[in-house]
Image (tube, rainbow, N blue to C red):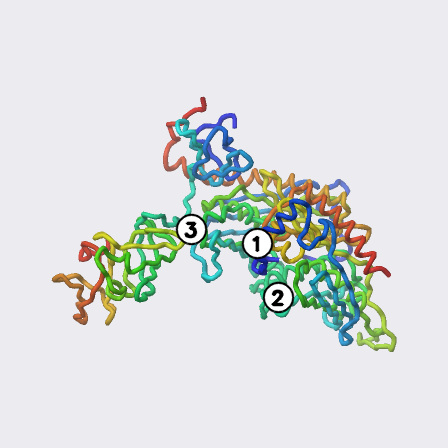
Amino acid sequence: MSENLGMVSKITQKRISELLKQDKRIDGRGLNDYRELKVEAGLIERAAGSALVTLGKTKVMVGVKIETGTPYPDTPDNGVLTVNVELVPLASPKFEPGPPKEDAIELARVVDRGIRESQALDLKKLCIVSGKKVFIIFVDIYALDFDGNLFDASTLASIAALKNAKMKDYVIKKDGELEYKANDISLPLQNYPVAISTAKIDDKLVVDPSLGEEIAADAAITVAIGKKGNICAIQKRKVGTFSVDEIIQIINLSKQKAKEIGAMFLKG
Amino acid sequence: MPNKKGVEKLINKKGRRIDGRKFDELRPIKIDVGVLNKANGSAYIEWGKNKILVGVYGPREVHPRHLSKYDKALFRSRYHMAPFSVAERKSPAPSRREHELSKVIRECLEPTIFTELFPRTSIDVFIEVLQAEGGTRCAGITATSVALADAGIPIKDLVVACASGKIDGKIVLDLSDIEDQKGEADMPVAIIPRTGEITLLQMDGIFTQDEFEKALQISIEGCKKINAIQREAIKNKYLVEKASIEPEPEETVNEA
Amino acid sequence: MKNRQSGIFVTPGDKLGVIEEFLPGLGTYVDDGNIYSSTIGHLLIDLFKKKISDNPSTSITPIPKVGDIVVGQVVNIQDKNIVIKISQINTESRSVLTGIMHVSDVSTSYVKTMFNAFKVGDFVRAKVISSTNKEFHLSTKGSNLGVIQAFCSNCGHLLVFQKHRLRCLNCKKIERRKIVLGYEKGLD
């Protein structure tokens, strides 16, 4: 996230980098440790699907809504996936009301890429009438409490909410109208991408940066891992650089972490 | 892009791509330096059918003033696409994509700029895409670092960017628009050529780790080729200008 | 590196030398013991001072240094301070920068309030005396510094210097300023 989110004092930042020289982190974690992660699905009954992810002190809620509408002209046979991020002012004193700013847009687009490029949702199955009518899946990400690493928490919450989402079973009538049945079906989710963020602070790599670490970091990178450990999205963030070796190291670490998290929260 | 029926082959039997390039071949690139009058520095790049104009202003006073930083210059960038730059008219209002690209381009170039030399000022970069054919962010970054040098702003090195990706299962360099849309993965990479540090890395699509490493490698090699073009472009502009003003400096001191 | 000599063309990132050999000069930077170019320019090797620099071909918009003479327009006046928009540095024009002046730096003689020396809109020639905190502090002490063009606070016409007074020929108003020597000759 950009430095204007910073409200961690220079002293804390200095402490973070001093501790890192001895391979310690300010909250006592090891360099490759994730914070405590909790996923609660289905808290919002009004939404088709919802999930609340708690990552340390970071809280992200995602609601999924399903509507029908027209497809994009270049993909007439595909349903539409829309990811939107609201950095609500109650989450941090630095979040302001108003239209999404660069940070929120970047976050939304990175989460979107992770879900889209891993083909987590089979968009072809969300087509009703080719070129005319498709299902539109709205994934609305709400950052409720901000203590760093919204990228991972948001991606995880989005996938958990999509997994949780239910819609009425339907049949398509001849005129393209839908006739709903009584039973519920799930969305056509075919795999579960996991995003892992790593920050670089003075040549040390730390996974799952907290807010202080995110601000102290020179550079950060988010890697989304799809099924079979394939890499499906990458975004390097912040002002700073990585060497090729560091990138390879991060990819290996991300694959391992993604496997652990995927096994814990997204199985079945 | 014309949406043809049926699956198009992105690579033909002879191992050539749609536009006749080999896997590791770049599109033709041409850079002009100092093309604008009012801007402190500028560059124009033609990369395949991409046509991008970049202007640099600054260091200058920051507006609004409260954004200014006491210890360094504020570096801002705006990536914008002209409404006529793509097949269907694009609304001139900045889209979410343009917001994101403005941000990543800024973060990609800032590490090379000596912003600490100009506290309480701003350096503003404006990137206007006049015509887009895939890989505009890479072309924009490549042109911007040349424009920054043209503006006389001290920089560590000329940042250079180049994308690689996967089409029809093959790792290729410098994806065109159609290859980006129909291919399996796209990965723009920007490096600081002198140190080989990566300052921009984005990816979407599906890569295995081996493919990723290979793609990163050919991207970096592509970047090095483009870096030579950047330096050549600067040389063309400044050596010619110098020669027309004064003859070769006589008092050259040879190294003992 | 082989044919390194003064006059060769360099671009940012080109290696110029090592710090054991030379002092890094203008347009260069040091990384890991090596000296690199940071601007487009021509190499300049000073074998006597053991200094290597990059004589830039580009010109950056200038930023005032202490001692520079600047020209600007008064945009805001308070009792003890004024704000000046600088538009020219040592006869070189540039995009605006803000400078400030305290009442104690107006003149060698005592000035009680800024309202006695300047009015909003006046063009002033001043000297940069400090750039502490990157605020440009200006001074008009000295006979060649001060208002070079003043306007009537009543009707806006140019004030002329006649019979030891600044007068408005339009509305006959007489005003006070800290003017430069030779104000009547106009802008140079």
Q: Up-down: is B13 above or below A44?
A: above
Residue sitting nearer the eye, B160 or A132: B160
Q: So how many labels did they put on this image?
A: 3
Q: From the viewer's perspective, tell me whether residue A78 is left or right of residue C109.
A: right
What type is the residue that disc 1 sits on?
A: Ile
**Which percent across, then down, holds residue C174?**
18, 68
Residue carrying label 1: A11
Residue at x 69% of width, y 59% of height: A151
**Mark 2 or 1, closer to the camera:** 1
The location of residue B91, given as percent across then percent down, is: 58, 65
The numbered dot on residue B97 is none
Mark 2 or mark 3, whichever is nearer to me: 2
Using the rendered image, report if marks 2 and 3 lie on a common chain: no
Classify 10 Å Cα crowding around label 2: few (below 14), some (14-19), many (20 and above). some
Residue A44 vertical placement versus B123 (above, below)? below
Query: What separation in Å lies between label 2 and label 1 (alpha carbons)?
Result: 20 Å
Residue appearing at x 81%, y 56% in the figure: A262
Q: Earlier in the sequence, mark 2 or mark 1?
A: 1
Write down the residue under mark 2: A92
Q: Nearer the viewer, residue B48 or B216?
A: B216
Chain letter for mark 3, please. B
